[in-house]
Amino acid sequence: MAFQALRQRRRLTLLLACAAVLSACDRAGAPAASAPATAFKAVDITGANYAQDLNLPDADGRVRSLADFKGRLVVVFFGFTQCPDVCPTTLLELAEVKKALGPDGDKVQGIFVSIDPERDTPEVLKAYVGNFGAGFVALRGTPEQTRDIAKNFKVFYSKVPGKTEGSYSMDHTAGSYVFDTRGKVRLFTRYGAGTEALVHDLRLLLKEG
């Protein structure tokens, strides 16, 4: 009986030792826990293979690209100056976001891309974005350039005939693209998300540096 009890104790000791070794091996081979994903309010499109650059003339005729704004967060919105609601609301909210960020508001660049170059002349665009504060940039290409850049950004737009002959409005994607300080597209923020959500997301991106 004593001999049998001794064998059982030795067997138990061996099993415990094996379990300890296996546990150590599992811990050594397990991958490190990944950092939690950043909790953006907007749609996170980090790594997207679209919305790569702009390369359109501004209201002064100077061709601009994302490289011109390196070091700043860039918010790009496609619209038209005769838009009755979505476009002015979006630009007004962005102006409020810049104010809410305090000194960091200077690190945010708003860019308005016209989808209606026929009516949005350089003079009209310059006056329009000026209504929302200094620092906004308006871009306007040819109809062909506008088509190509909208396709690259996956932005929809289309003329909608008006009530009188020759008049029209524009249907278009109502949302903004946000680029980080390195010029990489990171977020798509839907129209109506509100200023607080955008302030939250821009602060997170500014912390990234």
Image: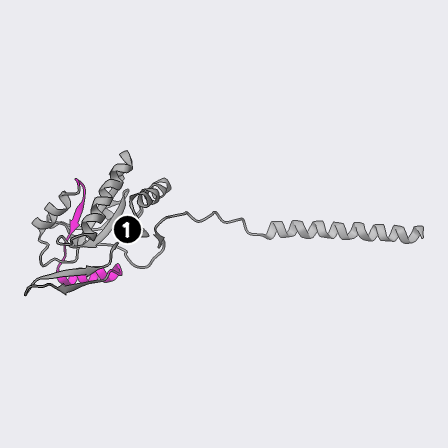
Q: Is residue 43 one of those drawn in magenta?
A: no
Q: Residue at x 41, y 47 (%)?
A: 39
Q: Residue at x 80, y 49 (%)?
A: 13
Viewed as shown, does residue 146 lie left or right of 39? left
Viewed as shown, does residue 201 lie left or right of 157? right
* Magenta stretch in the rendered image: 133-155
Q: Give 29 or 167, whichever is nearer the viewer.
A: 167
Q: Residue at x 36, y 55 (%)?
A: 47
Q: Name the residue that disc number 1 marks.
A: 192
Q: Label 1's element?
A: loop
Q: Quadrant of the C terminus?
A: top left
| Rendering coords of residue 152 (x, y %) | 25, 60
| Rendering coords of residue 12 (x, y %) | 80, 51
Which residue sits furthest front?
163
| Rendering coords of residue 192 (x, y %) | 28, 51
The image quarter in which residue 82 lies: bottom left
The kind of residue on which mark 1 rests is Gly
Q: Give 134 or 171, whichever is nearer the viewer.
A: 171
